[in-house]
Amino acid sequence: MNEKQLINKNYYQTFLQGNDNHTPLQTLGDTFFQEQKKEGADLSLIRFAQGELYFHNKDMESAIYKWQTVTVDSPLESWAKKNIGDAYYELGWLNEAEKTYNSIHTKNEVLLVEVALQLFSLYKDKYNVEQAYLQIDKAISLNPDYPKVTEIARVYYEDQQDWKNAVILSINEATRTESLQWYNILNGYVIKGYTIEFVPEYFLDALHVLSKLEQRFFCQLTKSLWNSYKGNDSFLPWIKVVNQLFANVEWNEHEDGSVVNQQREWNDITHLFYESFLLLMNGDYLIKDIEIEMPNLLSNSLKIANKNIFLAAAAMAWNEFFPSSIENTTLKMAEKILFNNEPFTQSHMETEKLYKTLMEWAETNQIGLNDTEEVKTSSMKTTELLSIIQNTLSEMLEKRIGMENTYNKTIDQTNERIGRLKGLVNTLKDMEIDQTKAILKSYRLVKEETQKELELSIPRLLQNSADNVTADSNYKAIHDELDKKMNQKIEEHLHKVAFPLFRKSLKTWIKTSEGELKDTQKYLNDMTDSLNKLDNENQITLTCDFQILSDWHRDLNRLVHRMAYEKVNIMNRSKPSHLLLKSAGKLFGNMKKNKQILSSQYRKMVENDSYEDITDVVLSNFFQEYDLFEKAIVSDIALFFQSPFKHLTKIISNEEREIQSVKDKLIRIKEKPEHFYNPIRLFEVRLLQCQILKKTNENYTYVSSVSVDGNNITE
């Protein structure tokens, strides 16, 4: 059977040959009618075909019914189940479709892939990422050559931003299919940084295959990978991969072993070889880490860059310091390049590069050098600059012993500075506590003074209100009249006496608090001046947040200008004496002979009341918002000190990291002297390379027995 027809549900076309006069359904109906007349007829194939037509005409119910009648022993039974799942899927009945797909058991690879792809789509619709991954992986493992299956996987991985699986897929497919399209996709991933977590060796086979396919693509991918590994921990493993790759790839070679190449992309590879040589020689690597890979790197680079005088000089210089590490064929190639060189102008530039690298390494490792600031490399001759580099290397070796003293001194000075900073932090904490207490205390004192004045004046004002009670008073309404006059007296006293005094005291309080906070800032300024004298490079500035004073002015002004008196129920309280007199006033208030008695009783009640409860209510209303202001003072003062605390904490943390870094360096130079001497040795190799370049450019005959006696090159 044609599996393509089964996939596209076009199997029914096998029944239509020679029946152009009828519709497909009519033809299949006639065929079914004729076939069922036969004894033992198997109608499964016709029913399967009818189901396809119903499916294409969106009659899913009829299609499902037809496919369900396909017998178990029919060769299309599994395909019928798959089609039933497809019908459920089209209807949106995902659970039924999933169950149907999973019930299919077959050895037919095409059907298995189709089911896996359908389940993949279904699980995507159900947002079941885990199952979607399982199904697309299953489809690829069954047959990666199945139409569009790897492309579907790639798109899905990218949609999920699953760059790990996307990279793995592109590498596998590029290697398996030798397709430049997949190599191009892989190159795109590398450029975007999606491959940085992969170990370099993972790409070796793919690169080896590509080198045989197309050199231009090979150069592009190699360049992208090379750039991605520069500056991270995988750089040295990548150099190892480069060496393996270029040592084992079959190139078209000249008689001297150099590679015949016409692609301009090889210029980029040459540049990367030399750039890598410089990176490995910049003092960050130990000799034991590069002594195997460096000779291979130089040998491979000269195969590619068969006219590069810089790499040739590098190979000769390396071999002088590490004899027999580079093969004779490579050395002969290097000699040939040096002998046959044309005049060039970059010799001084290379020497300047070395000097700059040397100075950076010295600064990083805190090696104090003499007169380095005065050197202007661009304005001096190459010979003079080479001499300076030679003297600098000698000076570095002499200062090796002094480095321990420098590190110890740095540690002591930094410890002293950290101690002072921590002492300042503790002092600042004490100042915050003391100033919080002092400012709160003075604020509360202002409140207490006003409170005491009101506790004395309010009862006296209310008691004096007895003068408003006479024999002519209207005793039926006297409670309300007295209540009104008493509230008026309290309000008038608050506005004219108590509140002005309170406002004046608050202004004095803010002014005093401002002075105390400014004294704190002055103390911090004096302390930072003292600390800054110990370290001219890391200057400290500690500034407190004086915004809180502006906030206090604003908040208190707002409270002062919106002060409103809230009337208090004084004479209509539920006190027995009040209730009794109020009732008596209503009963006997119109009887003249009783008014004198009532007047006397009212006056006595007004004069003898302590009004303690009334005073408490007035005070509570008066101080309510000022109490809230008081609660915020603590957090405001903490805010005032917050910036200095944060700044000091950050400085201390930085200083502690710095001191740990210096301690690590001290331990390293004591326990691992190679971390100092190895870079010096490698700088000497670079120096010899620059000397060779200079002499070569001056048309001196170079002999392979060049050696270094410490200061000069002897020939």
Image (cartoon, rainbow, N blue to C red):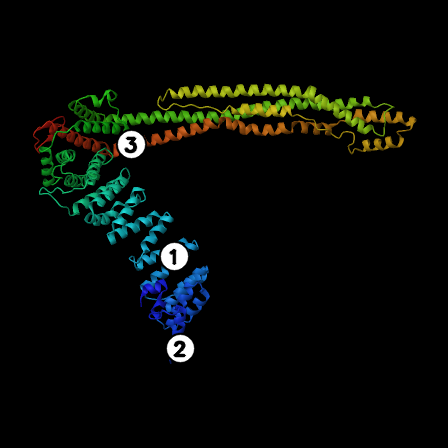
* Residue type, mark 1 in image: Phe
- Asked if the residue at tag 1 contacts the one at tag 2, i.e. Cβ–Cβ closer than 8 Å, the answer is no
Disc 1/disc 3 C-alpha distance (Å): 56 Å
Query: Where, by quadrant of the figure, is residue 688 drawn?
Result: top left
Quadrant into which the C terminus falls: top left
Residue 588 place in picture, x, y as percent = 89, 30
**Figure check: 512 above or below 577:** above
Residue 179 place in picture, x, y as percent = 25, 51
* Residue type, mark 3 in image: Lys
- What residue is pinned by disc 3? 665
**Residue 36's mark?**
2
Q: Residue at x 35, y 61 (%)?
A: 114
* Residue type, mark 2 in image: Gln
Residue 519 seen in this snapshot:
yes
**Residue 493's mark?**
none
Task: Look at discs 2 and 1 and give the one toward the viewer.
Answer: 2
Residue 344 place in picture, x, y as percent = 14, 29
* Helix, strand or loop status at disc 3: helix
497 lies left or right of 326: right
695 lies left or right of 618: left
Task: Look at discs 1 and 3 and give the one toward the viewer.
Answer: 1
**Residue 120's mark?**
1
